[in-house]
Image: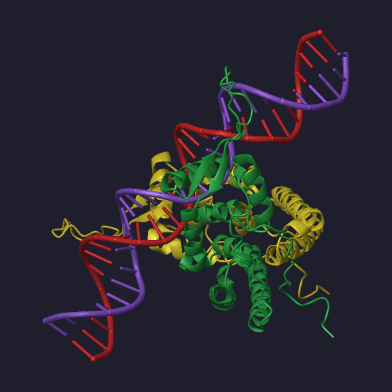
Chain colours: A green, B yellow, C red, D purple
DNA sequence: CGTGCGATGTATCGGCCCGATACATCGCGG
DNA sequence: CCGCGATGTATCGGGCCGATACATCGCACG
């Protein structure tokens, strides 16, 4: 999952580890608290070994050749490669079982702007199915095994059930919106593209303004 | 976390691994999908090595000494020890940072019936604090960095924010209910105790029936 | 002027937990 | 009688986390 998220973020611009972590936290804040360095750095090394990303020198070397007497430990900037972009496309499109658990779905969703509509629909429906199953499990427990459990445990199940129902409704809305056509996708953002990246796509969820 | 959950369940009755997993899934279904055996068995071994639990023979050995020609691989039943009960009490009462993350809080809450009221209150308030912080983080992102993020990412944050607000309200209710006195606790369930264990404690949340 | 402290920044280590996999037994229906 | 799904125990590789260590930079406070 981290692999996918890093590849996705580096596609927007090169970054060093610390920055990456902050962006990760901002983008996935709704899903997970904060990525640990104990996960981040090993993953970066893995990605580098696979050739999906490369290190880029921090100082552009325009200056004189002062070869670092003090062995300055400067920041390490990572940059995605062409193979890395292919890898990202592969990961974002394929949907295994882990695509639908909380974290996996969150990461995929966070990069929906770079996902084609058919895949978005597939993922939203897969997630809905999974949540519906969890919901049924909770209803079963609350129905059949209620007398075996104490009041606090039951209250926990009720709260979980409520969250499931709410998420299913949310997904229904997103699915309907997705089917109805208006689906924004960030253009591939090719490395050479010039202009501003300020496209503000029409949002999912109910539209706040209507077309006349 | 698994350690705490296992100790808690074995306090109700001895169980073998498979059964333990089912009970765990029933009790924590609102929190996590299903405990993996790859977690369960190593944890059981750990607990055994520490002396918190012991293996109990499946067949009570009342029968003749037929010494298992076929080396019958029978089920392995685990039983909590006195030290294990102490350990559980220690774990359930102490509150580190991990007590307030999603999983940790869920497990603690699921065993609130075996937790004293002061600890329950402390944990509920700690959890509320943590969720409030997450909520503020999300509000910050939605306020300050909104234009840097695409519509899908923003929608994710909104959904997360909504979930936070909802959970805070839920916690407020539980806290108020807890403060108001009526707080059920399962009696220690001492190993020697005789009677039925059918105490049905008054539930958290709004009471559905009122006393005249 | 110096000094310490919080933010920035890179990195490792032990440990928990997961998914995949393997293997054995039991009961039941075809 | 045979297969098949439920029951049941167990290991292995790998991902991710929390704790920890260490270095630099800017700046506020004495």
Picture quarter with the C terminus of chain A: bottom right
Towards the viewer: A4 or B74: A4
Q: Is residue C1 above or below residue A170?
A: above
Residue A166, position in %: x, y? 68, 74
Towards the viewer: B196 or C15: C15
Towards the viewer: A113 or B119: A113
Q: Is residue A41 left or right of residue B79?
A: right
State which quadrant residue C29 falls in: bottom left
Q: Is residue A92 left or right of residue B206?
A: left
Note whether residue A75 is visible: yes
Residue A200, position in %: x, y? 75, 66
Q: Is residue A119 left or right of residue B143?
A: left
Q: Residue at x 63, y 42 (%)?
A: B94
State which quadrant residue D20 falls in: top right
Q: Is residue B181 above or below residue D2?
A: above
* Total residue callouts: 0
Q: Is residue A212 above or below residue A194?
A: below
Note whether residue B95 is visible: no
Q: Is residue C27 left or right of residue B88?
A: left
Residue A190, position in %: x, y? 59, 59
Towards the viewer: B129 or A54: A54
Q: Residue at x 79, y 56 (%)?
A: B139
Q: Residue at x 58, y 68 (%)?
A: A115
Residue B58, position in %: x, y? 31, 59
């Amino acid at each position: 999952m981290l692999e996918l998220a890093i590849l996705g973020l580096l596609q927007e611009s090169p970054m060093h580890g610390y920055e990456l972590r902050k962006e990760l936290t901002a983008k996935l804040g709704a899903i997970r608290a904060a990525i640990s360095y104990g996960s981040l750095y090993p993953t970066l090394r893995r990605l580098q070994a696979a050739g999906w990303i490369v290190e880029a020198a921090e100082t552009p070397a325009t200056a004189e050749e002062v070869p670092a007497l003090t062995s300055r430990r400067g920041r390490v900037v990572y940059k995605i490669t062409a193979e890395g972009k292919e890898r990202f496309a592969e990961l974002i499109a394929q949907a295994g079982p882990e695509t639908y658990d909380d974290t996996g779905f969150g990461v995929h969703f966070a990069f929906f702007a770079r996902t084609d509509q058919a895949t978005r629909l597939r993922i939203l429906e897969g997630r809905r199915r999974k949540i519906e199953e969890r919901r049924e499990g909770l209803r079963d427990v609350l129905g059949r095994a209620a007398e075996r459990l104490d009041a606090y445990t039951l209250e926990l199940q009720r709260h979980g059930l409520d969250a499931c129902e709410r998420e299913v409704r949310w997904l229904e809305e997103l699915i309907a919106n997705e089917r109805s056509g208006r689906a924004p996708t960030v253009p591939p953002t090719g490395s050479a593209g010039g202009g501003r990246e300020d496209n503000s796509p029409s949002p999912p969820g109910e539209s706040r303004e209507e077309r006349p």
